[in-house]
Image (spheres, rainbow, N blue to C red):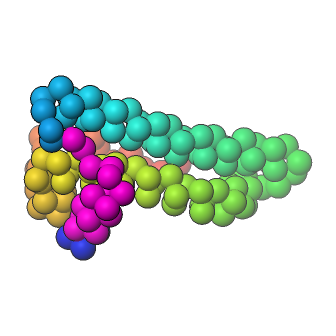
Amino acid sequence: MKEIQSFAKQYQNEMGWEISEESFAKSRDSLLNNYMLLTTEVAEVAEELRKAFNLTATLVQNGMEDEKAFELAKNQIKENVGKELSDCLAYMLKFYNYFGIDVEESFYAKMEEVKNRKNKDLVKPAK
């Protein structure tokens, strides 16, 4: 992740896409704009999932077994989901870099925190 974070910082700088640090007002506007763009990309992931679910339903209506239909649908959206998730990651990395947060340290610390939570969701057995 350190390589990806470093690459993202350099790439965003070269493209002029970093979050502004010029002033409070420009930083606020830039942070809000990038947050809006991130949420747009997350919605595009949801749109790809919707496509997969709709395709699965159509294939099942046409007589295909649901697990096979879903596998076909997942394969059909896989490339686009990867692109949209990459867009999400790029925007997230902008925030990490703006705030000077090490992605790996933050991620592993958060996973340890979740692991040790007292109120975490229990895993439900599969049906």
For the residue pair 36 and 57, the one nearer the viewer reads as 36
Q: Residue furthest right?
A: 62
Q: Decide whether the magenta segment is chiefly helix, strand or loop.
A: helix
Q: Is residue 103 above or below residue 36?
A: below
Q: Is residue 90 left or right of residue 116?
A: right
Residue 108 seen in this snapshot: no
Q: Is residue 92 left or right of residue 126?
A: left
Residue 58 visible in the displayed image: yes
Q: Position of residue 10 (x, y in %)?
A: 26, 65
Nearer to me, 83 or 47 = 83
Instruction: Give coordinates of residue 46: x percent, y percent.
Output: 54, 41
Query: Where does the image place residue 17, in percent across and percent down from the top left?
Result: 33, 50
Name the residue: 52% across, 58% down.
Answer: 83
Give the tally of numbered discs: 0
For the record, the magenta segment spans: 5-20
Q: Nearer the viewer, residue 56 or 14?
A: 14
Residue 109 is left or right of residue 89, and the answer is left
Which residue is situated farthest in the top direction here?
25
Which residue corresponds to the image point at 18% horizontal and 54% vertical from the top-left?
97
* Quadrant in the picture for the N terminus: bottom left
Q: Quadrant of residue 120?
A: top left
Q: Is residue 3 above or below residue 22?
A: below
Q: Residue at x 41, y 38 (%)?
A: 37
Query: Where is 63 relative to 42, above or below?
Result: below
Is residue 92 in the magenta section? no
Q: Is residue 43 left or right of residue 125?
A: right
Quadrant of residue 104 within the rendered picture: bottom left
Image point (15%, 41%), residue name:
21
